[in-house]
Image (cartoon, rainbow, N blue to C red):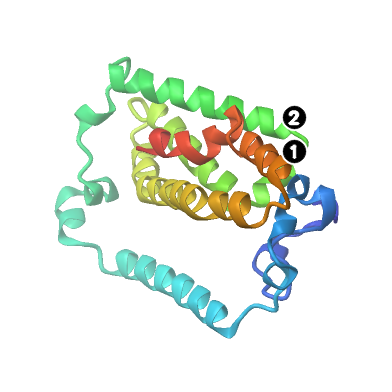
Amino acid sequence: MSSISQISLWDFVDPSKPWVFGDGKAAFEGFANVIPKHFRYGPWHIGSRFALGLLFGTLIVSATWMVLNKPSNVVEGGGWLSLFRIADDQYQGFTTAWYVNLATFLWMMFVCWRIMFVSPTGKAAWITFTLWSWTTVTVRNGWLVLSPWIPFVRLIAEILRFPGLLSATITTSVWNLLLFPAVVLFFSKDHEQRMQRIRYFTSFWLTQLHVFKLLFAT
């Protein structure tokens, strides 16, 4: 497996690169090996490239349209914040909601710290969709903590609302309804390996990433 320091940002979007960086025990403690190699290393199907291009193209066109054709409520309201109709009472400091955001942010940051410095994967874990989703939700909770005193970050928090909830929903549903059952039921060699994987996938820390993240995002 290549060292994470040798992986460039372009590797994440280069369709000629694998989406699992490595093989053997080093590749996420060997669990990535249950996926057939031709799915991990490609080449990418032309339909996948088209779908990704369409997705990013739509995002760019939508953002450009919003900038060039400001909705009427933005013009009338006198700022981009009005586009999201953010009420001040949603962002009062030292309320129950604010303390919930603070506690959630601190806990999620602690999990990030533990993955980075304690877990065997380290910062390499951030090549996964799961950790980018976790980070998005973490950052949004952090902005919510600051928003009563820094109004501009309310806009950032609102922008991250849908991506955070959507990515957390995808992670929770795909992992628990598809990947976890498939790995345990169809890709385990015997009962001992099946039980080992059940214990690993239902551990406290992985449950935070694959189950509780949806609660934190909500």
Q: Residue at x 43, y 70 (%)?
A: 60
Provide residue 10's location: percent of width, then percent of height: 70, 65
Q: Is residue 53 left or right of residue 96?
A: right
Q: Residue at x 75, y 57 (%)?
A: 33
Q: Amino acid at mark 2?
A: Phe
Where is mark 2, residue-wise? 117
Instruction: Identify the element where label 1 is drawn.
Output: helix
Provide residue 55's location: percent of width, then percent of height: 45, 71
Q: Residue at x 70, y 58 (%)?
A: 34
User: Is 21 situated above or below 44?
Assistant: above
User: What quarter of the picture does the C terminus occupy?
Assistant: top left
Provide residue 151's location: percent of width, then percent of height: 33, 34
User: Is 48 situated above or below 19?
Assistant: below
Q: Using the image as rendered, state which of residue 147 and residue 24 is in the foreground.
A: 24
Estimate how packed mark 2 is, as few (under 14), some (14 to 19) or many (20 or more) residues with alpha carbons within 10 Å: few
Q: Residue at x 69, y 43 (%)?
A: 191
Q: Which sits earlier in the primary sequence, circle 1 or circle 2?
A: 2
Query: CB of mark 1 within 8 Å of CB of mark 2?
Result: yes
Q: Amino acid at mark 1?
A: Gly
Residue 122 numbered tag: 1
Residue placed furthest toward the top: 94
State the CA–CA distance, disc 1 to disc 2: 6 Å
User: What quarter of the picture does the N terminus occupy?
Assistant: bottom right
